[in-house]
Amino acid sequence: MAGSLPSQRHHFDIPGDVAYLNCAYMPPMPEPVRQAGRRALEELAPWVATSKSFFEPGERLRASLSALIGGDADGVAFVPSVSYGVGVAANNLTVGPGRTVVILEDEFPSDRYPFGARLAVGGGEFVVVARPAGATWTSGIIDAIDERTAVVVAPQCHWTDGSAVDLVAVGAAARAVGAALVIDVSQSLGAYPVDVAAIRPDFLVSVGYKWQMGPYSFGYLWAAEQHRSGSGIEQTWIGRKGSDDFNRLVDYTDELREGARRFDAGEWSNFTLLPMAAEAIDLVTDWGPARVSAAIAPLTARLEEGARRLGLMPVAAEHRLPHIVGVRFPNGEPAGLRDRLAAARVFVSLRANAVRVAPHLYNDAGDIDRLLEVLEEATR
Ligand SMILES: Cc1ncc(COP(=O)(O)O)c(C=O)c1O
């Protein structure tokens, strides 16, 4: 769809006195996604569900998700969480003694723990890239990559403050030393373009409930072609070849389904969550990540400018993605800030010493000004 995006507030049920600026935590559920859930519950009946009901809706969602990331439907798997998806990646990559996993300082724990477990068992160590002062992460990550690097784990922007990583450049640096790239796009997919054809990650992982607008517990994994002969975390029946023929489920087989379907979590064909997730991906695709990004940018720019006027330290637009802005305080978090935010019904998160501001298409300049008022009072 061409043209700029108008406000989408009509899709969201947000009380008039709430300034909700916390999409990076979770957005209110869009009405079309709620409706898809209600419809799914009303239509759910075991005498209607055939073996096709377990597979076909998932195939449609694999296609729409893959279109959103510039990948192919065969590479898509359904996972309940990022920790699960990163666990699949960690289990299917080689690390070992003397090798390293490059990861960002203060990275989300779901990206770190699965590799921590992998290193504890198989050897190797983390190389942690320090948070850059007044820059993007990209050069720090590239500098940390050397011949010892086995895996680079990176997001498109840091979950605490929106600071950006150029994943195309990081991917090229990783490939140059034969290292794998695992990306967590939970904090950008849907709000900023993601293109696996350009980034060429080995694995991409994302939640489905943040900028992706779907329900909690339904996320995504995309695996590059060279990893589609690996194995998943579980021993599910549904991940086996021929599992769509329910008559033959006890013809046990070690052969797995084609493509990344072998990594799907058990019971992925959830009859309520999957239709909601599919509706959400259609909605986000219809908006278009580039248009979402362009529509949110003026709001974070307004916050950035206002915060700077107050003597605070927002991440500058050139060092972050347009949809999230972290604001730090020269003298630490002001006393009483949390109470003031709650009293004013202004919703943001405090993450790693930053106020993380994450607007979406339901916000306007008035919401940003309400936050700026609270920040002004708290720092006065
Ligand atoms: C970057 C990032 N990854 C992942 C998650 C969620 O991880 P999980 O699905 O394992 O709960 C979050 C939640 O805030 C996040 O910010």
Image (tube, grey):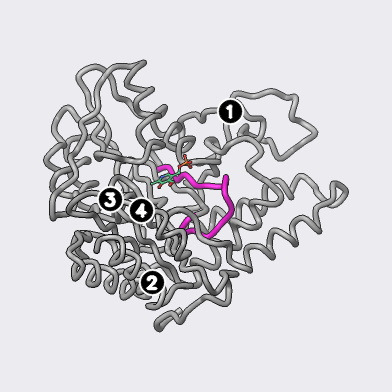
Amino acid type, label 3: Glu
Residue wearing tag 2: 370
Amino acid type, label 1: Glu
Q: CA distance from mark 2 to mark 1?
A: 57 Å
Q: CA distance from mark 1 to mark 3?
A: 55 Å
x, y (%) of residue 336? 35, 53
- Classify mark 3: helix, strand or loop: loop
Give the quadrant of residue 321.
Answer: bottom left
Residue visible at 37% across and 78% down?
A: 365
Which label sits in the foreground, 4 or 1?
A: 4
Amino acid type, label 2: Arg
Image marks 2 and 4: residues in contact by CB distance under 8 Å = no
Residue farthest right in this picture: 47
Q: Any atom of ligand 1 within 8 Å of the CB at mark 3?
A: no
Which label sits in the foreground, 3 or 4?
A: 4
x, y (%) of residue 46? 85, 46
Residue visible at 45% across and 65% down?
A: 344
Image marks 2 and 3: residues in contact by CB distance under 8 Å = no
- Classify mark 4: helix, strand or loop: loop
Image marks 1 and 3: residues in contact by CB distance under 8 Å = no
Residue wearing tag 1: 255
Instruction: Out of 177 and 268, give the one closest to the viewer.
Output: 268
Q: Earlier in the sequence, mark 4 or mark 1?
A: 1
